[in-house]
Image: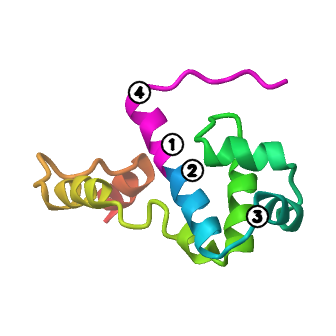
Amino acid sequence: MREKRALLPRHGRILAGLGENLRLARLRRRLSAAKVAERAGISRNTLYLLESGSSSTSIVTLLQVLVVLGLEDDFSKLASDDQLGRRLQDAKLTSPRRRAPKMNRDANKRNEEK
């Protein structure tokens, strides 16, 4: 049996919310847990763990269930809008340099020869 990973409470709530969303999507489609598990190629217990927010399920399992539910496009949206990363990148691009970059030794020799 896999070791259960310790998560911060906030992260546990995120997983539980994801599991609940998957369960609701399954129920809206009127699919039984057994049918989704069979189509995803996983056990019913694994689907139960995923829907309950367990940290022991794999990302591949999540993708398989999303495919069965017709939600695989949602998977590609994960982390697609990285606002913080873009702001950090923009801050580095717009900050003025303190000095010119160092030239390598070969370039210095060529400049001296001229």
Magenta stretch, residue numbers = 1-17
> Where does the image place residue 57, in percent across and percent down from the top left?
71, 41
Which label belongs to residue 32?
3
| Amino acid type, residue under disc 3 in the picture | Ser
> Where does the image place residue 68, in percent across and percent down from the top left?
74, 72
- The answer to which of 39 and 4 lies nearer the viewer is 39
What's the residue at 38%, 53% (across, down)? Answer: 109
Q: Is residue 8 magenta?
A: yes
Q: Is residue 114 left or right of residue 57?
A: left
Q: Are marks 1 and 2 in contact (CB under 8 Å)?
A: yes
Distance from the alpha carbon under mark 1 to that under mark 3: 20 Å
| Amino acid type, residue under disc 4 in the picture | Pro
| Amino acid type, residue under disc 2 in the picture | Gly
Distance from the alpha carbon under mark 4 to that under mark 2: 15 Å
The disc, 3 or 4, on the residue closer to the chain's N-terminal end is 4
**Split into 4 quadrants, where in the image is the N terminus?**
top right
Distance from the alpha carbon under mark 3 to that under mark 4: 30 Å
Q: Which residue is mark 4?
A: 9
